[in-house]
């Protein structure tokens, strides 16, 4: 039995957030049977949902306005195929990045699947990571945004355990990957999050069969 964990990096750059997410995914991959995949939103073209509701009216599990014009379908399909998630973002204005917010909004068609099977994500888990330039610069607010997305999908939230009650919060000091990896406490929590997401996903996958 294999468990697929999808990492989503919501940063516009390959720097601190990417490095921290990689560390969490590497820790997750140490668990037997875990496969990891990383998708970077960096460089992707993802249009925000405009609330046209064509997907709902026409009962199509796709965005009829933008799927043929941008890169969201790749992320959407990978998400549906995965058993667990670790989503990471740098802090932008005490929250997540605009492109990650746009991606979240484009899961509107998922409502159709959830209506048919309200428990479709019952055995899936997710963890959140936020990297900020200040120690208390909005990391927990950004993590809360990611948790909110999980809740709307019925995905069980996993935290980093003792001392990391919301998730992985890392202080980069605005020094890129080097600064983030120097935050020993933050990296320890991010790795713990990766391990706990993997273990929870394994148990959930077994429980679903």
Image (cartoon, helix red, strand yellow):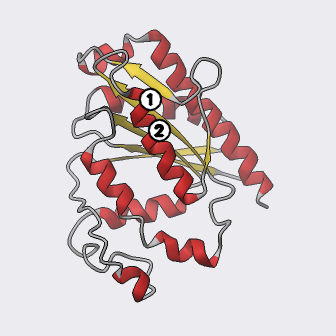
Q: Quadrant of residue 108?
A: bottom left
Q: Nearer the viewer, residue 28 or 111?
A: 111
On screen, residue 116 above or below 131: below
Q: Nearer the viewer, residue 172 or 27?
A: 172
> Going by the image, does 207 lie left or right of 182?
right
The residue positioned farthest toward the bottom in the image shown: 58
| Mark 1–mark 2 CB contact (< 8 Å) | yes
Residue at x 22%, y 36% (from the top left corner): 13
User: Which x, y percent locates residue 120?
Assistant: 64, 66
Per the model, the C-alpha gap separating discs 1 and 2 is 6 Å
**What residue did someone put label 2 on?**
144
**What residue did someone put label 1 on?**
140
On screen, residue 72 above or below 7: below
Q: Secondary structure at mark 1?
A: helix
Residue at x 26%, y 35% (from the top left corner): 92
Q: Nearer the viewer, residue 14 or 49?
A: 49
């Amino acid at each position: 039995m294999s468990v697929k964990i999808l990492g989503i990096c919501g940063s516009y750059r390959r720097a601190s957030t990417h490095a921290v997410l990689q560390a969490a995914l590497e820790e997750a991959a140490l668990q037997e049977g875990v496969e990891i995949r990383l998708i970077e939103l960096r460089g992707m073209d993802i249009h925000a949902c405009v609330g046209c509701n064509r997907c709902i009216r026409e009962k199509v599990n796709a965005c009829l306005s933008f799927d043929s014009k941008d890169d969201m379908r790749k992320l959407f399909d990978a998400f549906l195929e995965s058993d667990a998630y670790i989503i990471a973002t740098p802090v932008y204005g005490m929250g997540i990045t605009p492109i990650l917010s746009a991606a979240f909004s484009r899961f509107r068609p998922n409502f159709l699947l959830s209506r048919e099977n309200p428990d479709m994500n019952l055995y899936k888990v997710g963890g959140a990571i936020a990297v900020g330039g200040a120690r208390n610069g909005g990391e927990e607010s950004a993590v809360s945004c990611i948790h909110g997305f999980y809740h709307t999908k019925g995905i069980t939230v996993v935290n980093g355990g003792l001392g990391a009650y919301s998730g992985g919060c890392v202080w980069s000091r605005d020094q890129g990957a080097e600064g983030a990896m120097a935050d020993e406490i933050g990296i320890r929590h991010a790795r713990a999050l990766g391990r706990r997401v993997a273990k929870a996903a394994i148990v959930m996958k077994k429980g679903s069969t």
